[in-house]
Each structure stands twice: as structure tokens, then as C-alpha cells.
Image (tube, coloured by chain):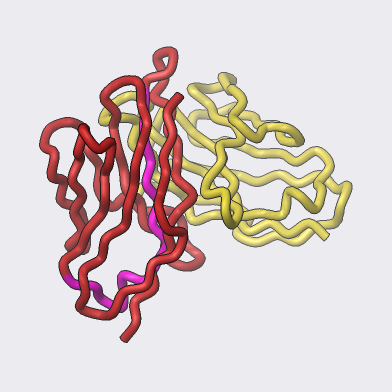
Amino acid sequence: DAGITQSPRHKVTETGTPVTLRCHQTENHRYMYWYRQDPGHGLRLIHYSYGVKDTDKGEVSDGYSVSRSKTEDFLLTLESATSSQTSVYFCAISDGTREGNTQYFGPGTRLTVL
Amino acid sequence: AQSVTQLGSHVSVSEGALVLLRCNYSSSVPPYLFWYVQYPNQGLQLLLKYTSAATLVKGINGFEAEFKKSETSFHLTKPSAHMSDAAEYFCAVSENSGGYQKVTFGIGTKLQVIP
């Protein structure tokens, strides 16, 4: 398995509170991604990073921000959580271009916003 | 723009029967194609990938998929289903987008294996 960890694995929070999810990799891959998984929608890209301090938006970025200050860490922040952000969040990594950008996934974080 | 269509959000097969999970894609250039498997409460695990080396791709756990350009398909098969195959399966397509390989996932197919 690729060396990817996510923390926390489970979190319950209240509407309006800030939440930060962490993704940590030990593979030294350039690219890191945050997805959310919801029934009927598959995986949808929130944000991705192509290097330290280099990030870009995905298809569902509203309400989310990210930061990458080190190669190994990619943080996802919900500035003010809403119930619509209840979901399972997955981090993924890749080297970007080789073999079609094969992505490897972390174990996920289940977030519940009450 | 690339896209992936997985036909059938739920598929049920009997143990020992053929597994066939369908995936059709659209892409403006020759794509890279992937199948991932997700077991309950776990992340996605790469099952196999097509990178143009061979049209029939063999993956882990006895799965294989065949790339058919004329049909724009990349269906996943396994000759004999096992109870442990019960999981959700995602097809994905990767295409170069401004120097970056953008990956698009299908909505997934849940496979139920009936004893």
C-alpha cells in the first residue's frame, strides 16, 4: 500500500465550526488531491496540489480551502462547516504524469456536520 | 471533455458466476483507463489500468478488463465470483489537460455476490 495516512479518521462537528483534515504521505509524490465521496456522485475532486504552495481548484471547491507547506502534507479546511459537507473525504497522491497519473488513495475521513 | 459512464449502480451475481461490470468512456485523445475497488469503510485500491501496452489488461484478484476503442468501452470481468468480491467498483479515465493528467471517476457499481 502507498504510504498515505489521513487524520482524523472520523469526526463529528457542528454547523459553523472550522474543520481541518490532514493528509500525510511518505512517497514523496508531487501531486496530492482531496476528493469527497457521496452516494450517487462517485468521487468528486475538491482541490489538488502540484507542489509545495501550488494548489488549484477542482469541480466542488466552494466552501473548502487547502494548504501545502511541505511535500508530505496536504491540509483541507472547511472554514465554516455546513451539513452539505457531511461526506467521506479521501486524499490521493500521484506522480502526475507517468502511467496516466495513477492515483493512490488514503483510508478516508468520515465527517459528519450536525 | 472526458467522462465515464458505469452502467448499473448495483449488480448482483451468484457465487461462481461470471462478473461483468460495464464502463464506457468518452475522451478526445487515447485515454488511460483504470478500475478501482473499494471495500466497505476503506479507500480505493487500484485493480488494474490500461496504458496502451495491451488491450487486455489483467489485474489483481483474478479480474481483467478489455479496452475496445471501437466501442469506447473498458468492461471489467472475472470468470467466477467469490464472496470476497463484494465491493464497490469505480471506473476512471485519465486525459492530458494542460500538461496535467486529469482523472475523472464514474459513479461506481456495487457488486453483490449471492451465496
Q: Nearer the viewer, residue A15 or B27?
A: B27
Rendered location of residue B78, percent (x, y): 20, 63
**Horizontal side of residue A61 vs B67, given as left or right:** right
Segment colored magenta = B80-95
Q: Is B24 covered by the magenta stretch?
A: no
Q: Quick one: A57 or A18, which is closer to the camera?
A: A57
Q: Which chain is yellow?
A: A
Instruction: Please identify the quadrant where the C terminus of chain B is shown.
Output: bottom left
* Residue under the image location 21 percent in, 33 percent down: B69
Quarter assignment of residue B17: bottom left
Q: Residue B105: image x %, image y %? A: 45, 42
Residue furthest front as drawn? B71
Residue sticking out furthest to the bottom:
B115
- Residue at 52% across, 46% down: A43
Residue sitting at x 61%, y 44%: A22
Instruction: From the top left corner, tell me how far across and down residue B22 is, in percent.
Output: 32, 52
Quadrant into which the N terminus of chain B falls: top left
